[in-house]
Amino acid sequence: MKAVVLYKTCSPLELTVSEIPIPEVRPGWVLIRVKAFGLNRSELMMREYEGNAPYITLPRVLGIECAGEIADPSDSAFHPRQRVVALMGGMGRSFDGSYAEYTLVPSKNVFSVKTEMDWEELGAIPETYFTAWGSVMDCLQLSPDDTLLVRGGTSAAGLAAIQLAKSIGATVLASTRKRTKYDQLVQQGADHVLIDDGTLKDQLLNRYPQGITKILELIGPATLLESASLIRHHGIVCVTGILGKKGTLDHFYPIKDIPPGVYLTGFSSNYPAQHIMDEIFNHIKKHHLHPSIAKVFALSAIGQAHQLMEDNASNGKVVINLNL
C-alpha cells in the first residue's frame, strides 16, 4: 500500500510516499480502508522535531485521524464497508497512523458514522470537531446567554468552535492576527472580530467593560494570563491549543495569576467515545453545519499540504483525499 512514512524529522517537502505492507489484522484492532484524513498541528510537530523525542520510535506512518470504510472488522462488532472515523489512541505516534491507504487502529478508537457527507467533508470532522465540541460544550458549558471569545479563531478548531457556538445562539467574538482574515471569521459566524495586535484587551474591554463569560484559548500559555483578565466573575477559560508554540507557563502562580472567581480548565482530545461522536454528527446534521476546508490534496502532495499548514496559510482544515 501507499503510505507517508516519517523516517527522520524533516522539512515539509521532504515528506514522500512509500510502498509498505498492508498491516496484518489482529484481535482488538480494526483495519480501515482510508478514504480521507485531515492534517493536524501535532503531525507537523512530529515531522518537525518531536520525532526525535526518546518516547517516539521511527520510522512511523503519521496521522492521528481518518475517515474510511472497514476493510477487516477482526473480532469487533463492525462489518465490512461500514463507514467509520478513527482518531487518537496513539495513532501516528505509538503505532502507524492514517497517512496511508490502510490503517490498523484499536477498535475502541473507531466509531461508526451515519452521514451523507462526502469523504472530503467527513475527513475534516473527527479530530477538529471532537476538540471543538469538548472544549465548547463540555469544558466551557456554553449556553445561549454566553459571550464567547475564540482566541485563534482562524485555526481549524477555532472555525469549528465558532460554528458550534453560533448554532446554539451564543454571542461569538473571534481573534486573528491578520486583518485579511476578518471577512472569513464574519462569514463563519463571528459577531465581532478582534485583531490580536497587542491591543486585543483594550478592544474587548471597550466593547464589554465588565469582561465576558467564556474564552476558548487556542493560542495557549502565551496569552493565557491576558485571557484570564478578560473574564467576568464565575466565567471560564478553556485552554485547548498551543498555536503560540509555547506549551508551558514559566513562573505561573495560580493564586495571583488567576483572578478570583475565574475558572480555568483544559481540554485534551485523548478520550473519544461513540456517544460523543453521535452527539457531534447529530448536531452537525440538525444545524446544517459544514467544515471549513482550506484545500484538498492528493496523498502524493503531502509535502505541499504540510507546507501550507506550516506557513499558517490554510484558513481552515487541510484534507487529503485518497481517491485523488
Image (spheres, rainbow, N blue to C red):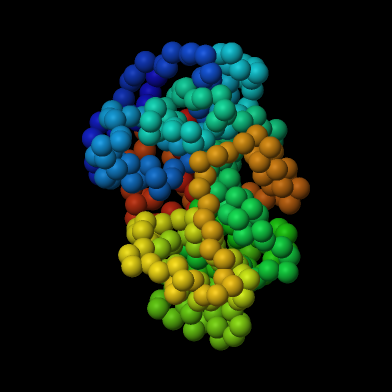
Q: How many marks?
A: 0
Of all residues, the one furthest to the right in this rendering is: 286
Position of residue 29 relative to residue 275, above or below, is above
Where, quadrant-wise, is the N terminus in this rendering? top left
Q: Find residue 275 and report its horizontal and vertical position in percent.
A: 68, 37
Position of residue 52 relative to residue 136, above or below, is above
Q: Quadrant of residue 226?
A: bottom left
Q: Find residue 288 and report its horizontal and vertical position in percent.
A: 72, 50
Q: Nearer the viewer, residue 193 or 29?
A: 29
Q: Quadrant of residue 198?
A: bottom left
Q: Is residue 151 left or right of residue 252?
A: right
Q: Find residue 42 and report its horizontal and vertical position in percent.
A: 39, 45
Q: Find residue 17 and report its horizontal and vertical position in percent.
A: 33, 29
- Which residue occupies 51% across, 82% down? 203
- Which residue occupies 37% across, 50% down? 308
- Which residue occupies 73% across, 69% down? 145
Q: Is residue 90 left or right of residue 158?
A: left
Position of residue 140 relative to residue 212, above or below, is above
Q: Quadrant of residue 20?
A: top left
Q: Nearer the viewer, residue 32 or 49?
A: 49
Q: Is residue 165 left or right of residue 175?
A: right
Asked if residue 321 can be seen in this view, the reply is: no
- Which residue occupies 58% across, 21% down? 70
Q: Is residue 58 left or right of residue 298?
A: left
Asked if residue 161 can be seen in this view, the reply is: yes
